[in-house]
Image (cartoon, rainbow, N blue to C red):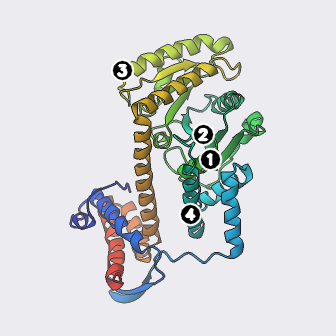
Amino acid sequence: MAIYCSVRSPVATLRRSATSVSDSAYKLTALSSTLWRRSYSTNLNRLVTNNSRYNVEEERTVPRFSEPKPMSEKRKEFLNKMLEGVLKGERSWLSQAITLVESSVRDHRIQAQNLISQALERHNAKKHIRRGAFRIGLSGPPGAGKSTFIEAFGSLLTDKGYKLAVLAVDPSSTRTGGSILGDKTRMEKLTNNPNAYIRPSPSRCTLGGVARNTTEAIALCEVAGYDIIIVETVGVGQSETTVADMVDLFCLLMPPAAGDELQGIKRGIVEIAQVVLVNKADGDLVPAATRSTAEIRGALKILRPQSHNWKPKVQMLSSLTNTGLDKAWDIMVRFRSKMLETGEWNQRRRQQNQVHMWSYVQANTMELLHADPGVRQILRDLEGRVMRGEVPAGSAADQIVDKFLESRIGESVATPEH
């Protein structure tokens, strides 16, 4: 069920009648604005509800976010060491901090948010900080040579004196939930580079080609002193565009192709790319790469550019022979200079922060919904009836949301604010 952002007030939203799935989404979004005010309450409210299926009354407990467990002195000391280690740019502490951020344990999440807040506060207090790290998103179809390009391009950047962080998102199995996380093995040279940091992370079946906590990982890499952060997505498709809301520059890496082969790339991801790189322009593939470069340039002329201040550029290169890498970096530098000059850089960063906020509101609201015992009571029965075609999907969604709202609104009435 899709959840959409809304700027309506909770009262106005709750007045809408639940007649469609969209209405259910509105109600959930409105509810999320009131849930977090009492998210750390230690009380558990017991409500008496009528179970219409069995026509009996039952007493059930409405779960609420409990107050985090008090931290031991040893844990506090460990987190303080982690904070200092991240600020000093120590890779071992940075890895542990990202692991903490990726944890699904609630206490760990709270500790991670506190860690990031303190790190950003101290990082932003530095007088020499002006614009932060240069965040680059990279995506491309399988076989485009993303890992080879990152190693060659990353070596070029470190040779120029930059510190580089690579956040490689690896796809997770929808059946087992596991990930191979083999990106570091394909970037052996860059892995051993003291000015480079490579962190593979599982996508955990999150749509958009990136992991849920990629934004926090980017923030940690930035405060750790990395000048350039490359986010490699899991692949190409219409859902791989989420990374564009996390980075300053989105780069699409393409293999040499011809004619209708270019149609295999979804138009949505081409539209958001500020730079398109045609890789593997070496040996017998040079003619095909040259032809592909011309075709892509022609296709981009038809599409409307995202920014009035920048038209997408196409560059042919070879990660094997390192030809064209300098030109690709020059294009990226021109893009950064243009965005900073026009003020679009800071404007884009502010808009991204807003998008990140709502994405977490949606994710946390869905977690609350699935954890609600009232929803669990009716969920399996409703799913079965929907699968058998007895109940429309929209009607079942409304019943689930209504049950969830009943629990939460009843909870608010039972425990007035002081």
Provide the secondary structure element on which disc 1 rests.
Answer: helix
Q: Which mark is residue 157?
A: none
Q: Earlier in the sequence, mark 1 or mark 3?
A: 1
Q: Which residue is mark 4?
A: 114
Classify the position of the C terminus by image quarter.
bottom left
User: Is residue 81 visible in this depiction of the protein?
Assistant: yes
Q: Earlier in the sequence, mark 4 or mark 1?
A: 4
Q: CA distance from mark 4 to mark 3?
A: 46 Å
Q: Earlier in the sequence, mark 3 or mark 2?
A: 2
Provide the secondary structure element on which disc 4 rests.
Answer: helix
Q: Earlier in the sequence, mark 4 or mark 2?
A: 4
Query: What's the amino acid at mark 4?
Result: Asn
Q: CA distance from mark 1 to mark 2?
A: 7 Å
Q: Earlier in the sequence, mark 1 or mark 2?
A: 1
Q: Which residue is mark 2?
A: 229
Q: Residue 134 location in percent, x, y?
A: 55, 37
Q: Residue 166 location in percent, x, y?
A: 64, 40
Q: CA distance from mark 3 to mark 2?
A: 31 Å
Q: Which residue is mark 1?
A: 221
Q: Residues within 10 Å of mark 4 (few under 14, many from 20)?
A: few
Q: Residue at x 67, y 53 (%)?
A: 86
Callout 1–callout 2 Cβ contact below 8 Å: yes
Query: What's the amino acid at mark 2?
Result: Ile
User: In the figure, 8 relative to 155: above or below?
Assistant: below
Q: Residue at x 45, y 24 (%)?
A: 312
Mark 3 vs mark 2, foreground winner is 2
Q: CA distance from mark 4 to mark 2?
A: 22 Å
Q: In which image quadrant can residue 361 be found? A: bottom left
Residue found at the very far front of the displayed protein? 127
Q: Residues within 10 Å of mark 2 (few under 14, many from 20)?
A: many
Mark 4 vs mark 3, foreground winner is 4
Query: What's the amino acid at mark 3?
Result: Ile
